[in-house]
Amino acid sequence: MKTNKNIIIIFILCSMLFVSCENTLEKYPLNYPSTETFLRTEVEIQMAIVGIHTPFYLYNDQIPFIIYYDTGSDISADRDVKPEQIYQNPTAWQLRDIWVNMYKSISRCNFILENIDRASENVSADKIERYKAEAKVLRAYCYLTLTSMFGDIPLIDHTLTLDEAYVSRDPVDSVVDFILSECDQAALYLQQTNDPNTMAITKGFAWAVKARAALYNERWTDVIDACEKIIELEGVEYILEPNYGDVTMLKGKTSKEVIWAIQYNQDDRSQGMPSRMKSRLAGGFSNKMPVQALVDSYECIDGLSIDKSPLYDPQYPWKNRDPRLHHTVALPGSTYFGYQFETDIDSVQCWDYNKTPAVRIANLDATHAYASFSGYCWRKYCDPLELRSDGASSINAIAFRYADVLLMYAEAKIESNQLDDSVYEAINKIRRRVSMPEIAKDKNQQELRSVIRKERKYELAGEGLRLFDIRRWKIADRLMNGMCYGRFPTGYPTAAPSIDEYGNPDYTNFAEKNKFGTKLGVRYFDPNRDYLSPIPTSERQSNPNLTQNPGY
């Protein structure tokens, strides 16, 4: 009898426990949002929008990924890895992380768009439409990033069920159609005010995403349309910063030249570009560096290339050059972070101007085994006002700025053979800022194509766009095959190399090319394969429906 009683008690207790567990499972968590209720308030919507941004804080060796792209191009080098080891390698973690992070943001955008109407009782219809528009533009930006790198990709516009998980790749044209449509729709509901240091999603950002996606896919009419909308706001929401050198420095964080940038600050989230780029004396590693092919590209102040200008003196190669060269690259003989920057191997001592009076010190930038292998360092994104010993930086990583919009507009007009005054004005505004001579209004289409391609190189070097420019212009196979050079270890050449119509040096027949040395190594680019990066191996292993790009 006692045993039966105990069994009944245990049964009752178990039943109570089951009911209790069942009721508990039906309750929503109290200390964090539930997917069943999330997005019912404006605060939750704002939290979700911030969550979309989080994957954009992706680094390659502490450098924001959108800036690191330049190390895969002809104008830059990474001491630790060659371009083909990343952008032409299906097992490269850098490519995998771009793929994963962009789709992570896309998934978050899709969740917001599917569930934001839960807040209709608490948030005005106008605000809901604005938040939807922000999610659409950020999703479009992710798809722009993916198509630029990989070409055909899966277009996912809703939260996938388990049965839908094995997606296939959609044609790039279909994805671009989607990007352009989303940007047009979103711009109707976004704010016009440009808040460059807030990551605010504005009409200008939507139009800039549309313009770049259209530019990369030769949709010239769409480029012109999007850029014209931004240009109409010049002087109100967008400007050319008077001092070109300020744009990628701390001062540039609040500049209305910036349309949208990934935001950093040392008290919350910082990036590490300066530590990777600065000279040894300035406390950097010098392992991300500009190369000789970039330095030799810049014109002289008469607007002629160095192989044609009477102003060019190879023994004083930095004199009389486009000022953007000096703002972009730390050149031998200049002052950099308060030190005399000299990379000639015979300069075993240099001046430290941080002391008064200046003193002579050991020149690590000439004698250290891991000083800049090219003999140059970047000035962009390296601000002497940031003096933290760990190299952490608050400078924002610029995704879009107004000068790029002017250049996209001019290129689209040139490629569609609309050679009117607005083309010259867009280019000359940028050249006037740095006191370079204006482009005369007597050029044919090919001559203007030469002008715009050079101008993009001079203006945007070091900002992460060069890789995609040389790919879409189909010139990467010529520029990314063969030896990558730094400066002469000591002294200077006696003549200039030949410069092609797009501002690219050709060292093939350069009599003194053996004096450059071979420190930066031989590069390889297959024109039948490498104009697209490979789909990451890890993604294809988890999804057998993902095909690979040709040649990989």
Image: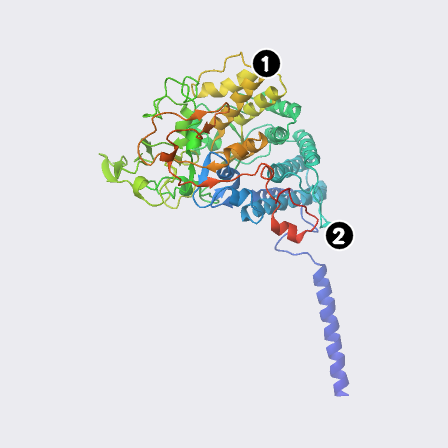
Instruction: Determine the CA span between mark 2 and mark 1.
Output: 54 Å
Does 287 sit left or right of 257 as displayed? left
The quarter of the picture where residue 349 lies is top left
- Label 1: state its secondary structure: loop
Q: Position of residue 461 (x, y in %)?
A: 47, 31
Instruction: State the residue at coordinates (73%, 64%).
Output: 22
Q: Is residue 437 above or below residue 350?
A: above
Task: Name the quadrant of the C terminus.
Answer: top right
Q: Which mark is residue 420?
A: 1
User: In the image, what residue type sits under mark 2?
Assistant: Asp
Task: Name the quadrant of the N terminus.
Answer: bottom right
Taking depth in this image into account, of 271 and 414 the one nearest to the observer is 414
User: In the image, what residue type sits under mark 1?
Assistant: Asp
Does 172 sit left or right of 252 as displayed? right
Residues tagged 2 and 1 counted as in contact (Cβ below 8 A): no
Q: Position of residue 532 (x, y in %)?
A: 60, 39
Mark 2: few/some/many CA within 10 Å (<14, 14-19, 20+):
few
Q: Nearer the viewer, mark 2 or mark 1?
A: 1
Does 476 sit left or right of 225 as displayed? left
Q: Position of residue 371 (x, y in %)?
A: 35, 42
* Identity of the residue furthest to the top in this view: 442
Q: Which mark is residue 163?
A: 2
